[in-house]
Structures are given as structure tokens and as C-alpha cells.
Image (cartoon, grey):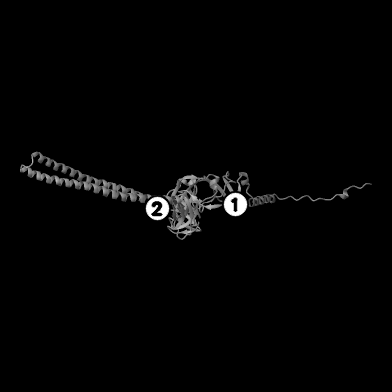
Amino acid sequence: MIEGTSGQDQVVAPPKKVALKKILLSISLLFALSYITLPTLSQWYSSIPSVDSKSINIETVIRGDLIRDVVVSGKAVAANAPQLYSTEMGKITLLAKPGEAVALNQVVARLMSPELDALIKQQQSTLEQLSINANRGVLADKEAQLDLESNMNTAQSKLNVAKREFQRAEISYGKQIISEVDWLKSQDSVTDAKRLFEHARKRVLFSMERLQFEKQHRDFLVQKEKLILEELLRRHDELAIKAPVEGVVGNWLVAQKNTISANTAIMTIVDLSEYEAELSVPEFYADDLGIGLEVSMKISGITVRGEIIAISPEVKSNQVTVRAKIIDPQHIQLRQNQRINARIEFEKKEDVLMVKRGAFMGSLGGNFIFTIAEDNYANKIAITTGASSVEFIEITSGLEVGQQVITSDYEDFNKAEQIYLGG
């Protein structure tokens, strides 16, 4: 007889039922844990981006004085750095080397001009010739005047003779010794003698005036030649080129012992007593520039004041060149072309709402900013801005003192209206 399988059967206990309250409690704990460690489900649902708070810059809106300015760079240049030029053509000898200190009126170069030397000798010879001619003319004038005076004296003698003859004739005519005709002839002789004497006297007077003019003309020619010679000697003296200021030699602009033409630049003398700052300002600020604006400059780690004294009328490479006078630079050892960092102050506004500059101005055109709200959220709000400085931007509307805002770049979340700050 075949046995059944009942001996292999085992009794299985039924599973215990889990209480519904325990299941609900577990689900609640799971959701609470997710809210603590992960972005909320509402964030996922609303697509709110999460940003690491350590990767952004957060600044506080403050109220204070805002100075609208711009930071520029430039170099120190001598306010007085004249260039020396050759006055004549010739061979140049440079006597002072670049960097060498020179005194006022010290000879720093000498020019040799054979042509000028020859011209001076020619004019000296001409002056001697004119002087001899003038002296010869004086002697000739004296001789001519003597001849005229002799003629006048002869006429005077003839007049005296005619007068005596007339006296004898008049006595003889009274005694009826001579005829009336002879008496009249003697009277005519006196008249002719008077006329000749008067002509001779006038010729002497006119001759004296003419000879005086001739002498003045000869003296004028001599004086003219003297002036020409003096000018040539002055040009010869300028062949010794002197330093117009006390300073140092900048650069040689010609080679030693070269033959140069007239009006050639030879060297530069730098006056160390007064410097100016030559600054390059971006073209964007050209309309804000003006004479007299204050400039804060940093030279060799020392801050000095200055003011703009000249503005270039042209723009080169998107830059406007301005010159600023350095005020009270005695305590600074300046050098030509030394680098200068400067800040030009355009405007000062007192008691304005402002926030530090940041990349947010380029992300949304400066029209929006993210403000820190509660629960680590940041909301985008509209703002309007005003003047800006190197460090701060004026806020004219949209923010209040004490608010915290994000000033870093918004590139990763510029389309969001709200962000969550994690980390």
C-alpha cells in the first residue's frame, strides 16, 4: 500500500499585518528628510535654479558720498624739456652725454661752420673798405668846401674893388672929372660884383648842406655793414650751443661729429625742477574732461594731488591725452617717462544710495538686481542707476539702505525671477 504525502506537510504561520499608522509615519519621516537635505519638491516643480552661495558676491546697500571718477595710467614728463637746434650748417661736436647734469648756459655742443667764418671775414673786409671810403669822402668834402670858400673870397675881393672904384668915380663925377657914363659903369660894376659874391656865398651854404648829406650817407653805409657784421658774429657765438635750463641731457638726436644742416634738432635738455603727468583717458570719458579737474596720482607708492591743465583736441587709439600739473612734488624723486597711476575725479555726490560695483551691471544691463530674501532665496527686482565711480554705483530707485544684493555675474541664472542659495 502506497503511503500519502501527509508526512511531508509543514504548518506555515500567516504573515503579520503592518499597522497603517507605522506606514504613514515612515512616509512622513522620508519627506521631512528630503526637505532638509535636498531642494524642495516645490523648487523642482517651479524650476527655481539653485546657486552655491560661496560662488557669488553679496554686498550691502549703503548711503554715503559717491565720487564719480575714472582710473587711468600715464607717465611723468618734464614740464620744460626744450630741444636744442643747430643754427648753421656744419660739423657738430657734442660735449655733454645723455644723463649728464648740466648747468644753465653751460656749453653742451659746439658747431664748426667754415662758411660762416668765411662770410665774417668778407664782411670785415667790406667794413674796412667802407670806413676808408668814408674817411676819403670827408677829405674830398673838405677840399670841395675849401674851393667854394676860395671862390666866395675872390668874389668878396672883387666886390670890395668895385666899391672903391665906384667911390673914386663918384668923387670924380662930382668934380666933373669923368663923364656920367663912366660913373654909371662903375655903379654897374658894383652891382655885378655884389651879385657874384651873393651867388658864391649861397654856393658855399648849399655845398655845406650837400656835403653833410654825403657824410650821413657814408656813415649809414658803414653802420649798416657794422650791423651785418654784428649779426654774423652773433651767429658765430651761437655755434657754441648752451643749455637753456638747468637739468640733465635727455637724448642725443644726432651722431657725434656728423655734418648737419641748419635747424636740425641736436639734443634734449630735461628740466628736473618741474614735472607734469601725461595721462591717457578712454574716449568714453572725453565729454566729462575739463580744465581744473582734480587728479589723485600714485607715484612710487606715494599719493600726490594734481589738476588738469591741458586736454588734447584729438583722439588717438580710442584715448584722449591730458596733462595734469603735479602739485607739491618736492618729496618725490621723479624721472622722465616714469609710470603714473591716477584717478580723475569728475563729480562728487553727497549722501546718495549706492552699492559696490560688480559684474551684474553687464548681465542685465544694470536694470535688474537680485536681492536676498528670507529662507535663502533671492528675488530679481527692477532698479535704476545713476552715476558710477571706480568702486560704487549710485542707486536711484528700487533698493533701500541695508538690503543685501548679489553683485556677481548673472550669466547662469539671468532668466530666472528667483534663485535658491545653497551650500
The residue positioned farthest toward the top in the image shown: 181
> Relative to 175, is 192 on the left or the right?
right
Q: Mark 1 points at which residue?
A: 55
Q: What residue type is labelled 2?
A: Leu
- Residue 62 vs residue 409, the one in the foreground: 409
Distance of label 1 from label 2 (alpha carbons): 80 Å
Q: What residue type is labelled 1?
A: Ser
The image shows residue 375 at horizontal and vertical percentages of 57, 51
Precedes in sequence: disc 1 or disc 2:
1
Which of the 4 quarters of the picture holds residue 178?
Answer: top left
Q: Is residue 343 visible?
A: no
**Residue occupying the point 38% across, 51% down:** 125
Q: Is residue 12 visible?
A: yes
Q: Name the residue under label 2.
A: 233
Nearer mark to the viewer, of 1 and 2: 2
Q: What is the crowding at mark 2: few (fewer than 14 residues within 10 Å), some, or many (at least 20)?
A: some
Q: Helix, strand or loop at disc 1? A: helix
> Relative to 313, is 421 on the left or the right?
right
The residue positioned farthest toward the bottom in the image shown: 331
The image shows residue 107 at horizontal and vertical percentages of 45, 57
- Residue 236 vs residue 184, the one in the foreground: 184
Q: What is the crowding at mark 1: few (fewer than 14 residues within 10 Å), some, or many (at least 20)?
A: few
The image shows residue 208 at horizontal and vertical percentages of 24, 47
The residue positioned farthest toward the front in the image shown: 177
The image shows residue 36 at horizontal and vertical percentages of 63, 52
- Residue 164 vs residue 243, the one in the foreground: 164
Work out whether 160 lies above or below 246.
Answer: above
Q: Helix, strand or loop at disc 2? A: helix
The residue positioned farthest toward the left in the image shown: 175
> Relative to 55, is 24 on the left or the right?
right
